[in-house]
Image (cartoon, rainbow, N blue to C red):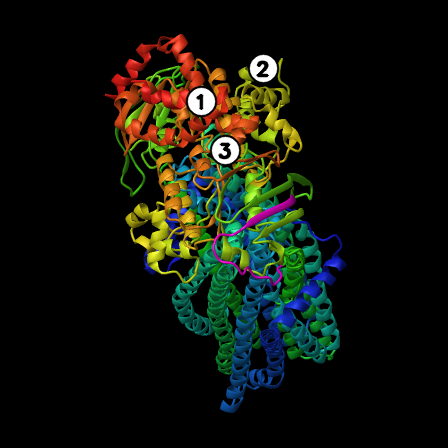
């Protein structure tokens, strides 16, 4: 995964960060306005209460304390005004926080939808270039990082209002004392900016290391069986501990930086207040100010000094926001989506399939291209079954994917009923063809949902498809039958069971072209034999392309295509290929030859070489 | 899920007790956090006194400096302020020291907690049993610990100093005016009570948010991991509809939670403001009655600010605290799960190297909450034998392999290697001698070479003696010649060299640059390089083409001659080549013997074999046409049925 690098220059971050903020405000203008209005009321109210207290001290408290006399009216006005300001301020706070939260979460939801729309639109080649973990974090953590800044933003804008009110109130009380106060507030702000600058690299590093810790844990737990069986637990704990220790150091660096700046940021207004008191007494002695003026300025300083930090929070969030947005927009701006045209397939019945000079190159994460298929020509007549046979890594699965347009060829054309797949409109290929992949994907849904995938298919048809895929027995045995939830939060299935669900998913659609990519590898041979027999006897009349190693599967085929190192190395009936193609012969007869050779060895050397005594021991053990 | 149940709203007092227990247990596990905590708290308390410097100075300045009988005394105020400034410097330094100490000790504790939990999870059999729960286990050593760290960074010390601040402010307020102090407490006490009730609603709201974000993540991961299937069935729209629904549900829950918090918080602001108004009102009345000076009243107002600050921040800190406690509880829950497949370590037996024999003694096994998978298995596997285990899917073959390699332990009964109970064998010894190759060969995002060397490199570090032995021939941890030799031994070197960059080919995330069959080849080479005395193959070549599989099987036979191997396979070519075939059905061993003997007497084996030969039959028929090579194949396929 790319490192959580901070953008190089502060000014650049600020500019780009402000652009992101602008976009967020444009997307949610009303809620944002409400939040800012609330924040402004809060800001004005907070600073205003300091001013009011000063004025009250001046006009009510000082005379009252001096005269030792108060009227009920004075008392009511004093408390009433303060209570009213408190009420307004708290309403402002409620608005600011509720609306600010709404802005943040609405933006997150909006961009999560946008990002996942891209995932569903972008071609699989794009998917293959990006690790699943990265895409997950783009739609989740990065979207969150982008818009988290919208939460403190209204508060920061409210603080600006507060600062203006406070500045006016301080200067109005006494210009000299006001000047002291006006020096302190920017100083708090400046210290905050310095702090954010210093802490940002540590925060970014901690963020990066959190991802690294998660990566190691994920990989290690994912490979748990291998870790365990190779006795790597200690080595893995060491590997994990090393990253965890780095994270610890980064967190300590963040903490100690914060630990240094927190007292400074808290101390500055206190220092300012002390200066105000000292200078204020001197001003009072000189007759230039009143007690109330001093109280007002000192109180304002204390009131305002904490919220001023909100400006710093926004600045602190900006680098994260910019990095998050860069990653999100990389997805949103990704081009090369699979294009669809508007042709339709008019025919019914079995499909005709043709490949003309097809090349395909796999593109690695670094953009390097590895050729997989070269100049593949293929013609499958309607209603026939073609077996694709070839050694491990020959490109068979890639070929299977091309047939249903999971990917487009780098060169050449794939034609269904004579129409280039790229000329067809969206959904047309899927309506005609179904692929059952090597590793079956099970959705977090019921058995029924996994088979129908939301299509209008009645339960009888679902049951028939499950029966044909030999999945009916175990589905019936599930606690809630067709309604049993599978997947992440549901029942776990074995590999063979998953494959049979995936097979039923394809069969229920009665596809005109069925592509099976070694789709029964985890199914027992005799179950597979029954599935294949069922496919044939059901007389479904579709065209079938099957990637297979097993002779029984190959025997079903009217034609065999032998693929070797990305090329079609032979075509014809099984018998023809056996005669003319050495590679094919070696591949499909491997088990037979092996058995025969063992048989001969057995005949020549005899069973004694293995030691009958050994076998007897075993049989006794089993008894 | 435990994640949601732990933070679900429940019996308040019960949960509080739980929180204390969590704290005690957690601190006991991470002594780094508590070491020197007393000093840290003391320093923190000193730093808290800094907060009352301003109110006291304000009061003194107003009463003694400004409103002094003889007129303002700037000199006295200057001294007062200077003293306060010194006090400020001292308390600020104390705050820094306390911060530093607390960050260092807690982060050290949390890092060791992570490693502790990480290691413990590897010792849990669930990890190898239930693939769906792995994501949740990752969270135990990442986000759950992060919530504790976040709490410490943001709120931990704040909570301590805020409490101190409340106490100091209360004492000072009482000194100035006890009626006003009673008023302040009288206003805030109901607020505290209300907070506890509201807090429950808030945490319930956040619990729902966490659940919704989990669902959203699940839906997003479907759109990413299942991209091929979604595309193949053109169900983009349906997927998007489902995604949109979970995203909207999350946003809705988050906004509701945020609104609840906003109301609670603004309620705090309102009460704080009203308290100021009430203090001014009552304070003025008290002042008129001669019980309070103006300086004391103003100082009191400053102290109220000291009081309301913690109360307002407290609502947020308490939220973080609950998150942290929930996270901590989840980590502890993992650590409290008994390590069912733990290393006996020093108490364990060390097996000398050499051929291994295995004995299952009346072994039963059931997955938690499930029916028995193995039912009373008695089995003896002789040393040096090549053993094949056959049976239908779900018959218990894989369970047998997992018990044999101690990925889990039997529910009852024993598994013995060379006469020693597996549970008593030291891991370092066991893992060196017994290696399993699972069906899904796990690959690191690294080069082919590094992936193959992975099973070997850590051993060399653990055994200086072994390293010394190998020093003349090997250099470095990924010795090229070693990997090359292993591939050559297995007749896989051709294949590896044909890859785009040979042994230096990057295999990608989870090995996605390789095909399923190729990933299995890597896993096999890795296990071979680990050089075990007992090699257990669990459908390890199921996705490999027949020619390669046969070639590989032959190469392995030669390379592991004299050692014990157990192969689980549904391709019966493996059984034909084995010395001993074990037939498993419905969790029981129904027969054991050589292939030929079983063909004669075991109905289950005959059925399995008939299925297999049916698959191969067309090869035999074609063979009669295709001449010599295929004719040999034909005799092989039919030979089984003629032979008694």
Q: Is residue A381 left or right of residue B567?
A: right
For marks 2 and 1, give the one nearer the viewer.
1
Give the distance between the C-alpha atoms of the residues marked 2 and 1, in whole angstroms.
44 Å
Q: Which residue is mark 1?
A: B633
Residue A516, which numbered label?
none
Please report the residue visible at 51 percent of the width from the left and 22 percent of the height from the top: B551
Parent chain of label 2: B
**Is residue A355 something one can see in this rendering?**
yes
In the image, residue B385 lies at what x, y percent? 38, 16
Neighbor class of circle 3 (other Cα within 10 Å; few <14, some 14-19, many 20+) is many
- In terms of depth relative to the viewer, which is nearer, B112 or A460? A460
Main SS, magenta region, reads: loop
Is residue A130 shown above or below A287? above
User: Image quadrant of residue B406?
Assistant: top left
Q: Earlier in the sequence, mark 2 or mark 1?
A: 2
Is residue A341 shown above or below A384? below
Instruction: State the extent of the magenta-drawn residues as a range.
Output: A340-358
In the image, residue A558 lies at what x, y percent? 48, 40
Q: Which residue is mark 2?
A: B470
Q: Secondary structure at mark 1?
A: helix
For marks 2 and 3, give the one nearer the viewer.
3
Residue A574, which numbered label?
3
Please report the residue visible at 44 percent of the width from the left and 15 percent of the height from the top: B353
**Is residue B87 something one can see in this rendering?**
no
Neighbor class of circle 2 (other Cα within 10 Å; few <14, some 14-19, many 20+) is few
In the image, residue B213 lies at what x, y percent? 48, 58
Q: Are marks 2 and 3 on the same chain?
A: no
Is residue B606 shown above or below A279? above
């Amino acid at each position: 995964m790319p490192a959580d690098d901070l953008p190089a220059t502060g000014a650049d971050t600020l500019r780009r960060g402000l652009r992101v903020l602008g976009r967020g405000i444009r997307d949610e203008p009303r809620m944002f306005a409400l939040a800012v209005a609330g924040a402004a009321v809060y800001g004005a109210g907070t600073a205003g209460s300091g001013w009011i207290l000063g004025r009250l001290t001046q006009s009510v408290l000082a005379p009252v304390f001096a005269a030792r006399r108060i009227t009920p009216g004075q008392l009511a006005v004093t408390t009433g005004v303060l209570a009213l300001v408190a009420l307004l301020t708290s309403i402002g706070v409620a608005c600011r926080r509720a609306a600010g939260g709404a802005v943040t979460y609405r933006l997150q939801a909006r961009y999560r939808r946008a990002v996942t729309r891209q995932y569903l639109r972008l071609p699989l080649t794009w998917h293959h270039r990006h690790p699943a973990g990265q895409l997950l974090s783009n739609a989740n953590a990065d979207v969150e990082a982008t818009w988290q800044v919208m939460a403190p933003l209204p508060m920061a804008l409210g603080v600006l209002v507060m600062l203006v009110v406070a500045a006016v109130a301080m200067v109005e009380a006494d210009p000299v004392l006001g000047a002291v106060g006006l020096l302190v507030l920017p100083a708090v702000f400046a210290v905050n900016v310095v702090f954010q600058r210093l802490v940002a690299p540590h925060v970014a590093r901690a963020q990066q290391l959190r991802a690294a810790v998660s990566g190691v844990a994920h990989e290690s737990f994912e490979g748990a069986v291998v870790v365990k069986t190779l006795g790597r637990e200690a080595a893995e704990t060491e590997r994990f501990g090393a990253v965890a220790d780095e994270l610890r150091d980064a967190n300590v660096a963040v903490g100690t930086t914060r630990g240094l700046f927190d007292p400074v940021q808290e101390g500055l207004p206190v220092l300012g207040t002390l200066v105000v008191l000292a200078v204020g007494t001197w001003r009072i002695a000189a007759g230039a100010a009143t007690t109330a003026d001093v109280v007002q300025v000192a109180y304002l300083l204390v009131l305002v000094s904490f919220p001023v930090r909100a400006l710093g929070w926004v600045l602190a969030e900006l680098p994260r926001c910019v990095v998050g947005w860069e990653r999100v927009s990389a997805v949103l701006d990704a081009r090369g989506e699979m294009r669809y045209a508007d042709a339709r397939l008019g025919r019914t019945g079995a499909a005709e399939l043709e490949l003309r000079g097809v090349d395909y190159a796999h593109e690695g994460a670094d953009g390097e291209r590895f050729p997989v298929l070269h100049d593949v020509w293929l013609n499958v007549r309607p209603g026939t079954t073609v077996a694709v046979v070839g050694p491990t890594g020959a490109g068979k699965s890639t070929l299977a994917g091309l047939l249903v347009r999971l990917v487009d060829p780098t060169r050449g054309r794939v034609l269904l009923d004579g129409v280039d797949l790229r000329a067809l409109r969206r959904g047309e290929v899927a309506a005609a063809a179904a692929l059952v992949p090597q590793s079956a994907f099970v959705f977090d849904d019921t058995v029924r949902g996994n088979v129908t995938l939301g299509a209008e298919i009645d339960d009888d048809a679902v049951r028939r498809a499950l029966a044909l895929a030999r999945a009916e027995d175990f589905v019936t045995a599930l606690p809630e039958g067709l309604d049993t939830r599978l997947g992440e939060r549901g029942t776990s299935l074995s590999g063979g069971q998953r494959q049979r669900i995936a097979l039923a998913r394809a069969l229920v659609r009665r596809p005109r072209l069925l592509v099976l990519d070694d789709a029964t590898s985890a199914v027992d041979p005799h179950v597979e034999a029954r599935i294949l027999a069922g496919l044939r006897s059901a007389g479904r009349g579709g065209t079938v392309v099957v990637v297979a190693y097993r002779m029984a599967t190959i025997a079903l085929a009217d034609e065999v295509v032998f693929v070797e190192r990305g090329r079609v190395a032979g075509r014809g009936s099984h018998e023809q290929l056996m005669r003319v193609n050495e590679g094919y012969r070696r591949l499909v007869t491997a088990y037979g030859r092996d058995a025969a050779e063992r048989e001969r060895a057995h005949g020549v050397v005899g069973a004694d070489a293995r030691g009958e005594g050994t076998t007897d021991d075993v049989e006794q053990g089993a008894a | 899920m435990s994640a949601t149940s732990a933070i679900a709203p429940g019996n308040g007092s019960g949960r509080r007790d739980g929180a204390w227990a969590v704290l005690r247990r957690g601190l006991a596990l991470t002594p780094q956090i508590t070491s020197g905590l007393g000093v840290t708290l003391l320093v923190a308390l000193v730093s808290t006194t800094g907060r009352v410097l301003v109110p006291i100075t304000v009061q003194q300045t107003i009463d003694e400096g400004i409103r002094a009988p003889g007129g303002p005394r700037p000199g006295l105020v200057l001294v007062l302020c200077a003293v306060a400034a010194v006090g400020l410097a001292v308390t600020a330094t104390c705050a820094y020291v306390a911060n530093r100490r607390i960050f260092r000790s807690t982060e050290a504790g949390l890092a060791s907690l992570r490693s502790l939990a990480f290691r413990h999870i590897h010792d849990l059999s669930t990890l190898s049993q239930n693939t769906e729960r792995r994501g949740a286990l990752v969270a135990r050593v990442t986000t759950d610990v992060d919530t504790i760290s976040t709490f410490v960074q943001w709120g931990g010390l704040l909570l301590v100093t805020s409490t101190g601040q409340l106490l100091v402010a209360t004492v000072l307020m009482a000194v100035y005016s006890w009626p006003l102090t009673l008023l302040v407490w009288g206003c805030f006490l109901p607020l505290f009570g209300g907070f506890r009730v509201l807090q429950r609603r808030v945490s319930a709201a956040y619990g729902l948010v966490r659940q919704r974000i989990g669902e959203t993540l699940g839906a997003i991961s479907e759109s990413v991991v299942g991209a091929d299937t979604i595309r193949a069935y053109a169900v983009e729209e349906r997927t998007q509809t489902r995604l949109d629904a979970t995203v909207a549900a999350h946003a809705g829950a988050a906004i509701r939670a945020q609104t609840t918090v906003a109301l609670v918080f603004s309620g705090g602001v309102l009460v704080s403001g009203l308290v100021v108004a009430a203090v001014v009102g009552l304070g003025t009345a008290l002042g008129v009655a001669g019980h309070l000076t103006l300086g004391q009243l103003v100082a009191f107002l400053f102290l109220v600010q000291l009081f309301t600050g913690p109360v307002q921040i407290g609502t947020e800190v308490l939220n973080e605290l609950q998150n942290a406690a929930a996270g901590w509880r989840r980590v502890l829950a993992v650590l409290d799960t008994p390590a069912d497949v733990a290393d006996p370590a020093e108490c364990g037996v060390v097996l000398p190297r050499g051929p291994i024999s295995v004995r299952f003694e009346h072994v039963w096994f059931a997955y938690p909450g499930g029916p028995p998978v193995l039912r009373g298995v008695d089995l003896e596997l002789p040393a040096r034998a090549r053993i094949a285990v056959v049976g239908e899917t779900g018959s218990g073959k894989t369970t047998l392999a997992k018990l044999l390699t101690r990925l889990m332990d039997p529910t009852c009964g024993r598994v013995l290697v060379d006469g020693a109970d597996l549970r008593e064998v030291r891991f370092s010894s066991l893992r060196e001698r017994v290696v399993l190759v699972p069906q899904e060969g796990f690959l690191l995002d690294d080069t082919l070479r590094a992936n193959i060397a992975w099973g070997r490199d850590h051993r060399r570090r653990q055994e200086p003696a072994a390293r010394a032995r190998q020093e003349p021939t090997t250099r470095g941890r990924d010795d090229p010649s070693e990997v090359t030799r292993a591939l050559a031994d297995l007749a896989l070197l051709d294949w590896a060299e044909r890859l785009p960059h040979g042994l230096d080919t990057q295999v990608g995330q989870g090995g996605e640059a390789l095909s399923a069959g190729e990933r299995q080849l890597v896993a096999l080479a890795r296990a071979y390089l680990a050089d075990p005395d007992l090699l257990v193959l669990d459908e390890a070549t199921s996705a490999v083409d027949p020619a390669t599989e046969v070639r590989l099987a032959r190469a392995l036979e030669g390379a592991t001659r004299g050692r014990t191997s157990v192969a689980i396979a549904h391709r019966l070519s493996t059984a034909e080549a084995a010395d001993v075939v074990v037939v498993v059905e419905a969790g029981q061993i129904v027969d054991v013997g050589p292939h030929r003997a079983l063909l004669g007497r075991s109905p289950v084996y005959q059925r399995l074999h008939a299925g297999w030969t049916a698959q191969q039959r067309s090869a035999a028929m074609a063979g009669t046409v295709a001449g010599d090579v295929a004719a040999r194949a034909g005799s092989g396929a039919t030979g089984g049925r003629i032979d008694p």
